[in-house]
Image (cartoon, helix red, strand yellow):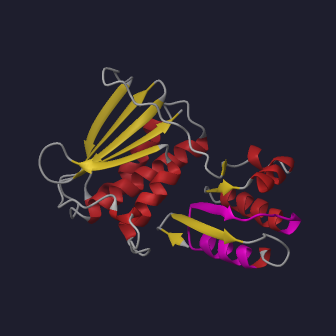
Amino acid sequence: MTREPNIALVPVHGDLSVQTAPALKRTLQSLMDGGTQRIVLNMAEVPFVDSSGMAVIFCTLREMRSRGGLLSLVNVSPNVMRALKIARFVDLAPVSSAGERRAVPELDPSAKPLWRTTFPVGTCELCAARQRIEHLARTMPFSNDAVFDLMLAAGEALGNAVDHTCGEGILATASGYPDRMVIEVADCGDGFDPTAQDAPGACEGDERGRGIRLMRLLVDSVSIVPRPSGNGMLVRLEKLV
């Protein structure tokens, strides 16, 4: 299981049935009691879900909503997706099929944003920065769930920047376009190899790698490149409306 302070990616293995549902319920309850706001169930290895498994998913969703959080399912097989559609779960929470990924058209370099704002972010200002991004996202035609995911992804990017710059020299830029919102986080740290976390043999416990994987689950496009000028990295997040 991959976990950040506010987000957890939980892999589910085998049939989610009366035999396995109680263990998953205990795991999810522990995460919620620990303050996790966003739980993503990776269903890639789940070929079947029965009523007991469905009950765990529904109950977790209801409790997460009551706590102001969100549960979603990714990499869902066709058979399990069919069951979720029959149960109308897909109307209540974000669910994506295995291999499903929104294509993100390249932004025209000449496109002018509807609005744009840039602001510095210090070590003690992460909460205020997330709230500011949430406020800006709510000016766009996003669902509440999309706003929540965008705020969490931005929080990961900002947290990574603070982690490898000691909180100095971080700038966040948020831009709104007719079809997307773009967030860029620039720092002046020593930089790192953004492909390392995808390489064979990469350490599963690497915190920065986990943050990148989670960002890619929460938004439609993530790019991490060296800053065009000076030291540091530039993280760009894009969320389509």
Number of numbered labels in the structure image: 0
Q: Position of residue 231 (x, y in %)?
A: 14, 53
Residue at x 73% of width, y 65% of height: 46
The front one of 236 and 79 is 79
Does residue 202 appear left or right of residue 18 in this picture? left
Classify the position of the C terminus by image quarter.
Answer: top right
Q: Position of residue 189 (x, y in %)?
A: 18, 59
Residue at x 24% of width, y 64% of height: 164
Does residue 55 appear left or right of residue 212 in this picture? right
Residue 63: in magenta span: no
Q: Position of residue 99 (x, y in %)?
A: 61, 50
Q: Locate residue 39: give its quadrant.
A: bottom right
Residue 49: in magenta span: yes
Residue at x 33% of width, y 30% of height: 116
Q: Is residue 85 visible?
A: yes
Q: Is residue 64 above or below residue 173?
A: below
The front one of 54 and 99 is 99
Q: Tell me which segment is drawn in magenta.
A: 23-52
Q: Locate residue 37: give its quadrant.
A: bottom right
Q: Is residue 121 above or below residue 201?
A: above
Q: Position of residue 203 (x, y in %)?
A: 39, 75
Can you name the residue that lies furthest to the front here?
200
Q: Is residue 70 above or below residue 31?
A: above
Classify the position of the N terminus by image quarter.
Answer: bottom right
Residue at x 40% of width, y 74% of height: 201
Can you name the residue that lies furthest to the left here?
230
Q: Is residue 152 visible?
A: no
